[in-house]
Amino acid sequence: MKVKHTSILIFLVYLMVLDIPYLSQTINNIIMLCCEALIIYELWNLKCLDKSIFENKSILVYLCVVLIATIVNMGISTRLMTALVIGIEYVLLFVAMKALIMIRGTSRTLNGILKITVWIVLIVDLCVIGTRGKGIGGSSILPYYLIGNKFAVSYLHMFFLGIFLCKPAISRNFIRRIITNIIVTAFCAFICYMVDCNTGIVGCIVIGSLTFLIGRKKKISDFLLRPATYLIIFCGLTFLLVGTQVLLNNVSFQNIISNVFNRGVTWTGRLEMFQLTLQAFYKQPIWGYGINSTYVQQILGWGNAQNGILKIMLDTGIMGIISFLIVVYSVFYKARKKENMIKIFPIVSFLYGMAVCSTVEINISGLYFWALALVYNVKESRKDKQTYES
């Protein structure tokens, strides 16, 4: 029965992480609450709930900060329900991955996630290719593709790429690893191209490139697993883009934006949104404006923070960004102490890809925290001796 319960658990996690774009936030919250209740029930059946809930205390602190920031700004409202649902989602991702890896081992857990991901990607890609990238809903500017807009499709393929590349990562055949890497990376980048998401293309290239590099040099993987390395790159990119003019004044950078991505130097109004977000942060720096703040939209009539770190700062202020960075630090700190990270390093590459993409999009959500939970909980066991070839 354990195998059956763990398979159900993986499926429920996907239902919890993926939003349905055609439904209102309230309906999505109800669906997510039902999924979260079922996940808790499955964890209880597996007798893993009490063993895993306090494994990573930093994610519980982050949940509390999100709730407090929302209550301070919006009181007891429907927005508080959204904060509660999202916060519980992040906590349950850590708890569920801990339980799954305890029972099935790392390799079989990744294999189970991959099987479901392949089916979801296949269905989404049939929609993308069948409509020639035009989607089946939304607007002509930002159409929907079953699971969401072009960014949802792109981040799903980045996650798929990270999970899929874990399979050949443990293979001793270097040529096989490289060929698999190139083919799958090219495929995912092509889907991102079809939905007109340059951010996703860059993310896929980052994941494929980093996974290739760690297959060549162990020193590179050791360096990239340092908490300081990830946090400096994550925060540093945002600082260079938003806090200074170093990147924007660089001629080569401007040429890439204009000639490769066919975007203006203002990045479709992003620079103005960055400045508005910073102005809002200076006004309420401690707790921000609450979950899913519409500050930028209220002024411009559209848009959002357009940056992962700025989004957290806008929603939850200094308290939120500090607690979030502590979560990330705890994940990399624990991962660096383990000796078998080679098998899961493509997921670390996914986290780096998302960090790069977060400089111009808000993508710190379910799939990102799912990857954090996997990296945090990976461990060696006898079951891990069974590779994906078994």
Image (cartoon, rainbow, N blue to C red):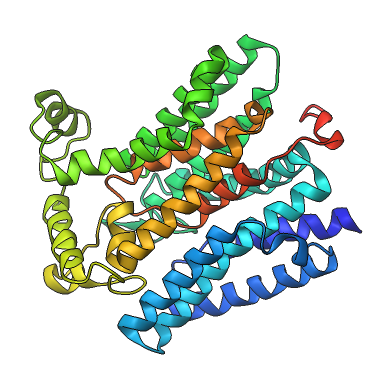
Q: Position of residue 360 (x, y in %)?
A: 27, 46
Q: Residue at x 67, y 57 (%)?
A: 55
Q: Residue at x 50, y 42 (%)?
A: 157
Task: Pick the residue in front: 209 or 11.
Answer: 209
Q: Position of residue 289 (x, y in %)?
A: 28, 74
> In the visual, does 359 lie left or right of 350?
left
Task: Pick the residue in front: 304 or 380.
Answer: 380
Q: Tell me if residue 156 comes above or below residue 17 in the rendering.
A: above
Q: Residue furthest right?
A: 1
Q: Position of residue 142 (x, y in %)?
A: 30, 57
Q: Residue at x 11, y 36 (%)?
A: 248
Viewer can see residue 193: no
Q: Quadrant of residue 244?
A: top left
Q: Tell me if residue 192 comes above or below residue 36 in the rendering.
A: above
Q: Residue at x 58, y 31 (%)?
A: 345
Viewer can see residue 149: yes
Task: Pick the residue in front: 111 or 280.
Answer: 280
Q: Quadrant of residue 136?
A: bottom left
Task: Pick the residue in front: 272 or 246.
Answer: 246
Looking at the rendered image, the quarter that the N terminus falls into is: bottom right
Q: Position of residue 178 (x, y in %)?
A: 56, 15
Q: Tell me if residue 192 comes above or below residue 91 in the rendering.
A: above
Looking at the rendered image, the quarter that the C terminus falls into is: top right
